Amino acid sequence: MKNKQKKRRLSKAPRAKSADRHALYEMSVQCTEGEVDFVDATFRHLRKRKAQVLREDFCGTANVCCEWVRRGRKRRAIGVDLDADVLQWGRDNQLSKLRGHERDRVSLHHENVLIVKTEPPDIVSAMNFSYWLLQDRATLKNYFESVRKALKDDGIFFLDAYGGYDSHREIVEEREIDDGGEGFTYIWEQAAFNPITHTMACRIHFAFNDGSRMDDAFSYEWRLWSLPEIRDLLHEAGFVRTTVYWQGWDRDGEPDGDFKPATTADADAGWICYISAEK
């Protein structure tokens, strides 16, 4: 009996209790290198110059800001988010990894993206469908107008979007993540969808191989905006040209991560694209 009790005391705590949800999110959802590659190369192609100042709206942990300043000594990044706790996590876990001169070129703002005032950036980025938190047309147009005013004269606004017929369904999708250790399972749940309003309730859960789970690690209440709606609002907000960048497929039928300008696309079950809006 004593030996059994000792074994119980020495057993590991469930991974779900000790895991950091923000770190799990970054490993599962974000590909900052690919994001920065895309906006950097696309800006250079469209404007024939290099961008120096990037503003990341709804920045969360400011992972993109950190990746941006690592790539050039003249680069500066501005992060804007309403969640003070997640901004602090970014300071403690992302900015702390930067070199001193890199960290000095990142400024984080605990403010509303609708009213924030910053220096004019070359690029404003709103990724991971974050702007879908703005659920009515007037508010989203107001946000787009504020971004246009904030940008430099030749600035570009970058967004992403997703869709396909699966996006209208209540579904659960799982993906195994290799974190260099025991690994874990990323679980995306579309818990509710209202076809009349296109409002959605989405959840992210994590499951671990010790049987433990972190349920509702992240919850979102947003609107599933269509590409025509987004582009129409961008034009109404004053952007002179919008371009949709569609992802290709490799030989195995998997997304290849290469996004190219497109005017037509297949009616896939699920797709992700980038959008650029030029001032």
Image: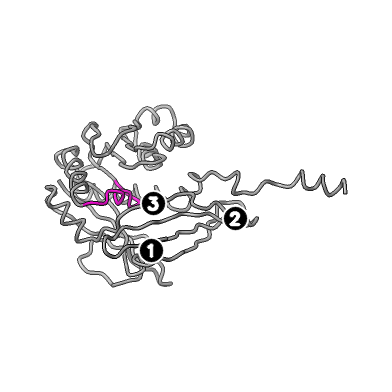
Residue contact between numbered discs 3 and 2, judged by CB atoms under 8 Å: no
Dots 1 and 2: beta carbons under 8 Å?
A: no
Count of picture labels = 3
Residues rendered magenta in the picture: 126-136
Q: On the image, numbered disc 3 is attached to which residue?
A: 220
Question: Of tags 3 and 2, which is closer to the observer?
Answer: 3
Q: Earlier in the sequence, mark 1 or mark 2?
A: 2
Residue at the spot 18% in from the left edge and 56% down from the top edge: 231
| In-image side of 136 versus 221 (left or right) | left
Instruction: Tell me if residue 240 comes above or below residue 255 in the rendering.
Output: above
Expressed as whole percent of the image width and height from the top left, the position of residue 86 reads: 43, 38
Q: Nearer the viewer, residue 241 or 232?
A: 232
Q: Which residue is mark 1?
A: 256
Q: Residue at x 50, y 45 (%)?
A: 23
Sequence order check: which comes first, mark 3 or mark 2? 2
| Location of residue 178 in the rendering, given as x and y in whole percent from the top left corner | 55, 55
Q: Residue at 35% of width from left, 32% of height from top?
A: 108
Query: Could you tell me which residue is drawn at 43 percent across and 72 percent down?
Result: 252
Q: Identify which amino acid the numbered label 1 is placed on.
A: Asp
Q: Is residue 127 above or below residue 86?
A: below
Q: Nearer the viewer, mark 1 or mark 2?
A: 2
What's under tag 2, amino acid-wise? Answer: Phe
> In x, y percent, where is residue 107?
34, 30
